[in-house]
Image: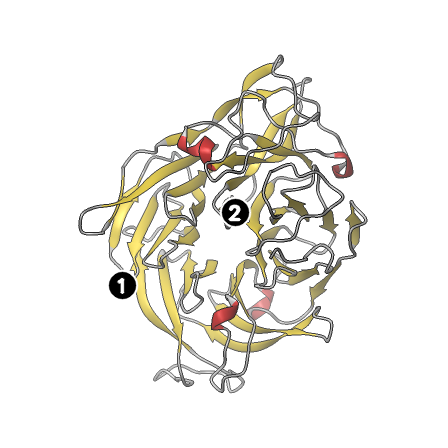
Amino acid sequence: MTMEELSSISTITAKTLALHWHEGGAAIYSLCTQPDSSCQSQNGQHLERLVTGGGDNNARVWNIVRNEIGEVTGVEYLSTITKHTQAVNCVRFNNTGDLLATASDDGSIMIWEKNEQIVRDFGVDVEDDIKESWSTKIVCYSSNMSEIYDISWSPDSKYICCGLMDNVIRIFNISTGALVQQIAEHNHYVQGVTWDPLGEFICSQSADRSVHFYQVSYNDDSALTIGPNAMYKSIKSEVVASTTHESLSDEIIQTPANMNTESTIGTPLKVGSNTLSATNQRQQHLYHNETLPSFFRRLTFSPDGALLVSTSGIHKNEQGQERNTVWVYTRAGIMNHRGPIAHLPGLRKPAIAVRFSPIKYKLREDIEPVFAFPYRLIFAVVTQDSIVLYDTQSKGAIAIVTGLHYANLTDVAWASSGKTLFISSVDGFVSTVNLGDSIATLYT
């Protein structure tokens, strides 16, 4: 393992947890952590749950074990969820943590809730070492049983949306399992979906090189309605033809000068001396095409809804050379149908997932913020072989972790504390990154 820290603000530690995660060393395609408010066992003991979804058709529930200084030292097995018939591609808790959704290649989304006592289904072998059990609350089926790549809960946990291999976005009612709406505007696999935490948008990312933005509204009966057509599609943009650096330690957030840089929630982007000139711009594709060897393009909103960060981005420099990047959109830009306002260039491999920490952090006193928030947001960009940490205050990456896995990475999840993140891989293992206190000082 090699680890590179790009500023002297703290020490971070990273390691791979070597244990038997899924049967036969199957790939782990997704993982998520449970919000802290719901982390209790049958006897009232506090648990910190981590769920993994694997190529053995199962999801598994684990309790995170920490040492006296809060670093993750291992996990304790709690339960296995076994009803899917094909690989589990995505696992996600709802915002309150009382419901768990698992999505599979078998075309179903299963919604689970923890039983008050261990329940053993008739005719089903249950391991003697399980410490809890989960039962299905509802099952949502795609009409043609197409593979589901990604899922996202609505903020009120009443709906769930998914992106599928048949190029369609589907939205289900969690109470009934009924299909509420399906949107068929993409021309290739839908590999990422995210629901705006403020409830106004659903965004999707596809192998057709586009990100689509859909307006969410409710009718007189408070039922969800979404138009059949995207309010905005981001495919190409007038982007500054800039030269990117080879070393991530030299990277800055680069901003096309023709983009609106104001957020509707009062957080303008601070554009300083590193803003690029608008004199050399051209239209270019923003994203990799379908030849990118990845199942996932997992985009996400920031927890305050101010930013959207999308994966699998590309940027061409003045010599026409393509560089991997992620693109950043503001809420105001989305509402005004404008393209991304910034990108994080120079990633060595394509980005396949991005996830914000769920909490807000105290601003560092030694750096002028790039985004004029009264707090810092930290997010992890997962490429095929590395984890790169950024925040909304710095002009470059704050840390890079690489060399943890032999195979491609697949997903990332943050602990509720905002001090630990977990990374999954096709090689069947999970790694942890623990942030030091000076990085993860909470905003009050």
* Pointer 1 residue: 175
For label 2, the SS is: loop
Q: Nearer the viewer, residue 337 or 209?
A: 337
Q: Dot 1: few (<14), some (14–19), or many (≥20) neighbours within 10 Å?
A: few
Q: Is residue 235 left or right of residue 202?
A: right
* Residue 214 rendering spot, x and y as whole percentages: 35, 38
> Residue 147 at what x, y percent from top left?
40, 51
The one nearer the camera, 333 or 24, is: 333
Residue 184 coordinates in the image, percent (x, y): 31, 38
Q: Which residue is drawn at 51% across and 61% down?
A: 55
Name the amino acid type tagged 1.
Ser
Sequence-earlier tag: 2 or 1: 1
Determine the residue positioned at 49% across, 28% down: 339
As drawn, 317 above or below 267:
above
C-alpha span from label 2 to label 1: 27 Å
Q: How is the image coloured?
A: secondary structure
Residue 131 visible? The answer is yes
Position of residue 35 relative to residue 155, above or below, is below
- On the question of residue 207 being in view, the answer is no
| Residue 404 image point, x, y percent | 72, 56
Q: The N terminus is located in which quarter?
A: bottom right
Q: What residue type is labelled 2?
A: Ser
Name the quadrant containing residue 10.
bottom right
Q: Is residue 403 left or right of residue 311?
A: right
Q: Residue 302 carries which label?
A: 2
Q: How many marks do you count on the picture?
A: 2
Indicate which disc residue 230 carries. none
